[in-house]
Image: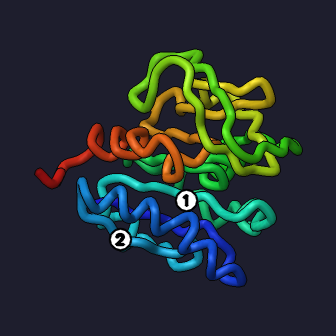
Amino acid sequence: MILIVDMNSKENPFGFFEFVLPIVSISEEIDECTVKHYLELNEKSLNACDKIILSGSALKDTVTFNQTERFKWLKGCDKPVLGICAGMQTIGLIFGGRLEKCLEIGMTKIVTSKENILFSSTLTVYALHNYALVPSEDFEVLAESPSCVHAIRHNCKDLYGVLFHPEVRNKEILQRFIETFSVNRRI
């Protein structure tokens, strides 16, 4: 089962429809999924899944950046995790990375620098962010645009992050993540 973590502020109910429901739509075609808001995460919900996707959030919704203590569980997590935009940024912060101002909106070309399970070569992706992640040495960079890092992978865990939004364009990236780590894949 996939746990999809809603990374949107409770003050922005529209974020759920824009950033979470498209992930649910793609995910449930392949495997069972459940959604939990990051404020409602608990040990039971983390133990019930076999992979986790952290959603993105709106451009000005940076509330999770100030609540990183709620995500310390990521350090001990042994399940595959994919962070999308705010999800990637939060993962990076937990492992000692830092954010820097970097506005990208719209179609952006990224170039792959490392072979990985999510994608290969040059891609045109949909970007929507105010901040870029400068990852710690715990991560290797998988892809970059001319402006910033767009994809990372932890050196020792199945922990991935993409700054762009594969739920908008390049849905096959989400599908590949889910299929690669699926125990109960739907046929």
Q: Is residue 158 above or below residue 44?
A: above
Residue 75 seen from this side? no
Q: Is residue 135 above or below residue 141?
A: below
Q: Secondary structure at mark 1?
A: loop
Residue positioned most to the front: 107
User: 155 or 11: which is nearer to us?
Assistant: 11
User: 104 or 135: which is nearer to us?
Assistant: 104
Give the residue type at disc 2.
Thr
Residue at image x 42%, y 37%?
158
Q: Position of residue 46 (x, y in %)?
A: 40, 65
Mark 2 lies on residue: 34
Residue at image x 24%, y 53%?
30
User: 78 or 119: which is nearer to us?
Assistant: 119
Residue 59 seen from this side? yes
Side of 23 relative to 73 (left or right): left
Q: Position of residue 28 (x, y in %)?
A: 29, 62
Q: Secondary structure at mark 2?
A: strand
Residue at image x 75%, y 47%?
105
Side of 2 relative to 75 (left or right): left
Label 1 packing within 10 angstroms: few (<14), some (14-19), many (20+): many
Residue at image x 60%, y 60%?
71
Which mark identifies residue 55? 1
Which mark identifies residue 95? none
Give the residue type at disc 1.
Ser
State if disc 1 and disc 2 touch (CB < 8 Å).
no
Label 2 packing within 10 angstroms: few (<14), some (14-19), many (20+): some
**Disc 2 to disc 1, how far (Cα)?**
13 Å
Q: Position of residue 67 (x, y in %)?
A: 72, 67
Q: Position of residue 97 (x, y in %)?
A: 74, 39
Lower sequence index among marks 2 and 1: 2
